[in-house]
Amino acid sequence: MPNTKVITLYDTSSREGKITGSWNTMTLKTRLSLNFKKLQFQIVWLEYPEIEPTMQRIGVVTTYTKRDGSPLYTVPVIMDPNHTTPDGKPIIITDSWKIAEYLDEKYPEPGLLFPKGSKPLQSVFHDYAMKTILLSIGPILVTRVMDILNDGSLEYWRVTREAYLGAKLEEVCPKGSEKWNDTWKTLQKGFSEMAAHLDKNGPDNDFVIGTQATFADFILVSMLQIIYLVIPDEWEGRIQHWDNGKWKKIREGCAAWL
């Protein structure tokens, strides 16, 4: 049954004029899932320092913690007024995987994000894609993301990422450095290995599982999309041409849901 009240998705904002729409891989997975389900939703755009107070205000319960043990609030989060808690408040779900499970439960049509029996395989694919793509290209993305952030998020991004990495962002993976070149070699090798796995579905099927999109496809496409948006020069000059244009084709195959 379609939703009659608009679902709210909490997402991270970007600099006007730089990109349009979601860029964060985590929120992209939920955006793709909502669009796949043909659900009406609105987006509340947040700067990074706004995430914690906003989540606290709307009553998000998080199981994540910071290094100091204090609660860690993240996006995506959805608020669904079509379904309520026993005290009448809209259901709130956080974490893209849990949100996808929730959407399958409450809105099974027009298709399931997790077809019966596929969750273990999709979980394995998630970890594989994270290691092969996102963690590999992370040293490059972490600096270039600053090009698309608003002033309200820039300092937060720099301080938190430099504390985690133990280095200035500009020193993590300078363009043209040995690490830069090694990163691209590792990434291309990983993409080619993934392409070989996906090719086992046959030449005319670019979905990860079966013959229709599942959450696994949105895991992959969210990673392709952040590259496409944040480092468009590298997408156009490199990745869209790799593996006979497979990644360009896969991204464009899900473009209607982005």
Image: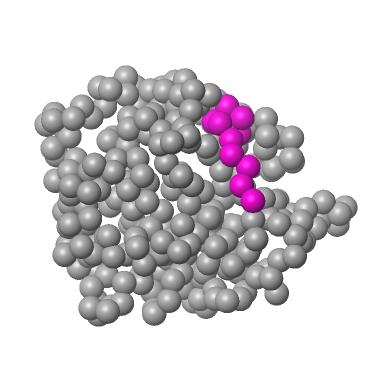
The residue under the point 71% across, 57% down is 6
* Residue 236 rendering spot, x and y as whole percentages: 22, 49
Q: Nearer the viewer, residue 129 or 146?
A: 146
Quarter of the rendering occupied by the N terminus: bottom right
Residue lying at the far right in this picture: please name it: 87
Asked if the stretch drawn in magenta spans residue 43, the answer is yes
- Is 248 on the left or on the right of 63, as rendered? left
Residue stretch in magenta: 42-51
Query: What residue appears at the point 32 percent right and 48 percent down from the top-left corner?
Result: 228
Q: Nearer the viewer, residue 163 or 153?
A: 153
Residue at 46 percent of width and 69 percent of height: 214
**Residue 140 can be seen in this image:** yes
Q: Position of residue 178 (x, y in %)?
A: 11, 31
Q: Nearer the viewer, residue 202 or 70?
A: 202
For residue 66: magenta? no
Q: Is 123 situated above or below 77?
A: below
Q: Splitting the image into 4 quarters, where does residue 250 fall?
A: bottom left
Left or right: where 5 falls relative to 96: right
Q: Is residue 107 above or below residue 173?
A: below
Residue 97 x/y as whole percent = 53, 57
